[in-house]
Amino acid sequence: MSTTIKDIAKVLGISHSTVSRALNSPEKVQEKTRELVLKAAQKMNYTPNAAARDMKKNSLHILGVVTLNMGRSAYGSEMIGVINQHARASGYQLIYIHVEDGFPSEGDYNILRERRISGLIFLSLDPVAIEFNLIFDEIRTVFVNCYCERPGYSFVQANNIQGLFDITHYIFQCGYNKTMFINLDSRYQASQERKSGYLQALKLNNREFESDKYMEVPVDFSFDFTTLDTDIQAAIDDGVDIILCGRDEIALEVYFTLARLGFSIPDDVAVVGFDNQSIISQRVYPKLTTVELPYQKMAEQGVQLLLNQNDQKPTEQIIINCEPVFRGSILNK
């Protein structure tokens, strides 16, 4: 039997009308009371029904957009621009809430409730798990480059495993023999997926995984890449002829490192990135061969999925492939 508002009220020892106001009219109760009700509702797996339908019925032509960590990216504005273009073309206004290094607060969600948005889209720089909130059941919600920690919601993600697998398999087919992989921090799902694709390609091509040829670095800009000079020099001395990088920012630092060490790209060592950030990949010399993370496609698919979704339509999970972009940082062997 599903949990009701009266069940929550009984557990908390308050009236069911107070619980109803806390869930549906947050401005009418104290913040402390609302937080208490929300925690109980989540713990008891409460799913809104009539109240949620009323919210949808009374919603306006407004979409909420929650952006996570976009301040660290050059392509975040491109994704936001795509969503803005498609939403406005369909007659929707947008409300933005931006969060760095965390998740939206209950106050943020209350702002969206009060504005009676008719849809909610999450847009993340990194494919993280988003903490569940009851608003996801109250309002149509789509996650782009991220996902809800509780399954059952629509999302659009990139196929990081396929992207790293394809480029690694390709370079072996081209005649490269030994790789080094400098990945981003394993706390991120993208890092784990890209490593998985790399390992699969090694296995298919009968190459052993060498732990000293694999390393992970933080995604922030405070990391001192000169500390990797000795490791990269040792790897090249051991026969590494191509360096794979989990992000284009890492590839940029590898360019600097190889220049300090006196190596030429791609004649001495080839370099491959991941993301295809044009501000990096097309402005270094030689231009960077990389794997394109389909940011604009994900944003477009996400907003269209949200606009086309209705109460009867089942949730959808869309995975978009990451395609290689070949430039001058590898040789055509």
Image: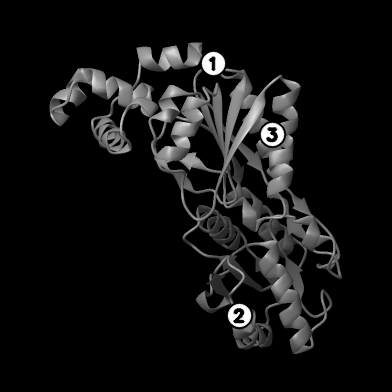
Q: Quadrant of the C terminus?
A: bottom right
Residue drawn at the location 39% of the way across and 35% of the way down: 133
Q: Which residue is mark 1?
A: 310
- Does the CB distance between marks 2 and 3 fall below 8 Å? no
Q: Which residue is mark 2?
A: 224
Frontmost residue, 192 versus 206: 192
Q: Secondary structure at mark 1?
A: loop
Q: Residue 130 location, x and y as percent? A: 45, 43
Of the numbered discs 2 and 1, the one sitting upstream in the chain is 2
Q: What's the distance in space between the residues labelled 2 and 1, CA to CA? A: 49 Å
Of the numbered discs 2 and 3, the one sitting upstream in the chain is 3
Q: Residues within 10 Å of mark 1 (few under 14, many from 20)?
A: few
Residue drawn at the location 28% of the way across and 25% of the way down: 46
Q: Which residue is mark 3?
A: 83
Q: What's the distance in space between the residues labelled 2 and 3, CA to CA? A: 36 Å
In the picture provided, is 195 more to the left or to the right than 20?
A: right
Q: Residues within 10 Å of mark 2 (few under 14, many from 20)?
A: few
Q: Quadrant of the N terminus?
A: top left
Amino acid type of the residue that numbered disc 2 sits on in the rendered structure:
Asp
Q: Is residue 46 above or below residue 185?
A: above
Frontmost residue, 72 versus 60: 60
Q: Residue 71 location, x and y as percent? A: 63, 54
Q: What colour scheme governs how the chains and residues are painted in the rendered image of this protein?
A: one colour
Amino acid type of the residue that numbered disc 3 sits on in the rendered structure:
Ile
Frontmost residue, 219 versus 89: 89
Of marks 1 and 3, the one in the foreground: 3
Of the numbered discs 1 and 3, the one sitting upstream in the chain is 3
Amino acid type of the residue that numbered disc 1 sits on in the rendered structure:
Asn
Residue drawn at the location 70% of the way across and 74% of the way down: 253
